[in-house]
Amino acid sequence: MLLAALAALGPFATDAYLPSFREIGHEFGATPVLVQQTLTAYMVPFAAMTLWQGAISDALGRRRVTLAMLAVFFIASLGCMTSWNIGALIGFRALQGMSAGAGMIIGRAIVRDLLDGTEARRLMSRIAVMFAIAPALGPIVGGWLHVWFGWRSVFAFLALFTAILWWSCWRALPETLPPARRLPLHAGSLLRGYWQALRSAPFVTLVLAITLNFSALFIYIVSAPAFLLGLLHVEETEFYWLFGPITGGMLIGTWLSGRLAGRLSNRRTVALAYGFMATAALGNLTFHLWHAPALPWSILPLVVYVLGCSLSMPSLTLLALDLFPERRGLASSCQGFVQSSGNALVTALLAPLLWGTGLALSLGMLALFAGGAAAFGLSLLLHKRSLAPNDGSPVAA
């Protein structure tokens, strides 16, 4: 439960305040694009710090780094709650982003510290349930807090939740990386490790598949104010129209991943998941080619897509981390960095270009999915070649 809560904190904080965008812009006299930059300010340092948090935990231990990052996030949440202008909110959101990814990154490394094979996949799937629910529940909880108490209450809630989580980790989170297994925190060694991971074609293709698969859904999450309020014409308290069904799809996908552990290999599970995602992305585009956005038809393809995405993610993550068994924290950081960087690019550049129409969003979803599918296909080819006998004869394509 601690690992699930740690994994949920960053995604929940990403979009819990989306229903408050209009009020924040009105109070601070900021344009919608400027308010959107509070989300970009969160995502960019989130991506940058995920590159280091796992590696730091490889050197200093999982528990110590987790507690420190939670303390920083608590302070940043209080800062967001008391912001006096849009610049201050952007600054404190950046501080939140610097610390929010630690629970997700270090949690994955803790799983691999403790478990292997089927058991690791099952636990990763259980954690993924909460990771999946968090970004879906965020705007629903945030919408009601916004209506009852105003937008600042969303950040007060985050501060309270973080304080409880810090205390729970201080009381109950064990150290899973003993000193004998820790790696020195030398810049040269770290840079060599990053270089080794990021020039590994099998690792990079798997991480790109994870990133692009999720970005195809994330484009709808960060566009939720424009998509729901502007195109589907719902109220601030009705964000459940998007995030409720997405939660259901995520739960089914992660449950199915756990059930298939030990029955289907990781690669076969991912191939099955791509079948769901392809059907959903093509169905979404087909509907919006002929119809304006409408409930529930604009939402149903997203449910099928997120089912496939959440089915694939635990298996893809394990395939990537197992390429570097001695440096799982560093590998987890590299994965988190690439995925968070993709999310930041979607937030800052792609979403504002596409959120004007349902057709544009559906085209963006299909293009990102196609990139993820191509990356996974390339990883299969690389895996096949790595298994071929190295006898000097040419390898068949």
Image (tube, rainbow, N blue to C red):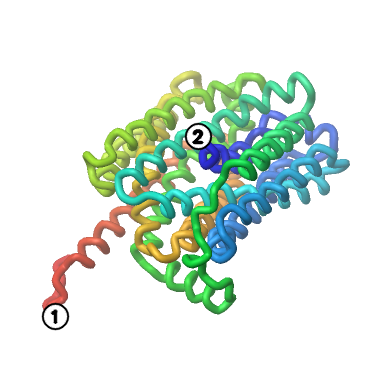
Mark 1 or mark 2: which comes first in sequence? 2
Q: Position of residue 353 (x, y in %)?
A: 58, 44
Q: Position of residue 248 (x, y in %)?
A: 44, 25
Residue 21 visible in the picture: no
Residue 335 visible in the picture: yes
Residue 130, which numbered label?
A: 2
The reply, left or right, for residue 224 in relation to residue 314 is: right
**Vertical placement of residue 192 versus 157, above or below:** below
The foreground one among 3 and 253 is: 3
**Vertical placement of residue 269 versus 55, above or below:** above
Question: Would you name the residue on which mark 1 appears?
Answer: 392
Please report the residue visible at 49 percent of the width from the left and 67 percent of the height from the top: 180
**Vertical placement of residue 214 versus 151, above or below:** below
Please report the residue visible at 88 percent of the width from the left and 41 percent of the height from the top: 84
Q: Position of residue 361 (x, y in %)?
A: 50, 38
The reply, left or right, for residue 68 in relation to residue 81 is: left
Q: CA distance from mark 1 to mark 2?
A: 48 Å
- Label 2: few (<14), some or many (≥20) within 10 Å? many
- Label 1: few (<14), some or many (≥20) within 10 Å? few
The amino acid type found where label 1 is placed reads Gly
**Vertical placement of residue 234 versus 192, above or below:** above
Q: Position of residue 291 (x, y in %)?
A: 45, 24
Where disc 2 sits, the SS reads helix
Please report the residue visible at 48 percent of the width from the left and 45 percent of the height from the top: 215
The amino acid type found where label 2 is placed reads Met
The reply, left or right, for residue 390 in relation to residue 59 is: left
The foreground one among 123 and 140 is: 123
Where disc 1 sits, the SS reads loop
The foreground one among 220 and 307 is: 307
Please report the residue visible at 56 percent of the width from the left and 66 percent of the height from the top: 59
- Which tag is nearer the camera, tag 1 or tag 2? 2
Q: Quadrant of the C terminus?
A: bottom left
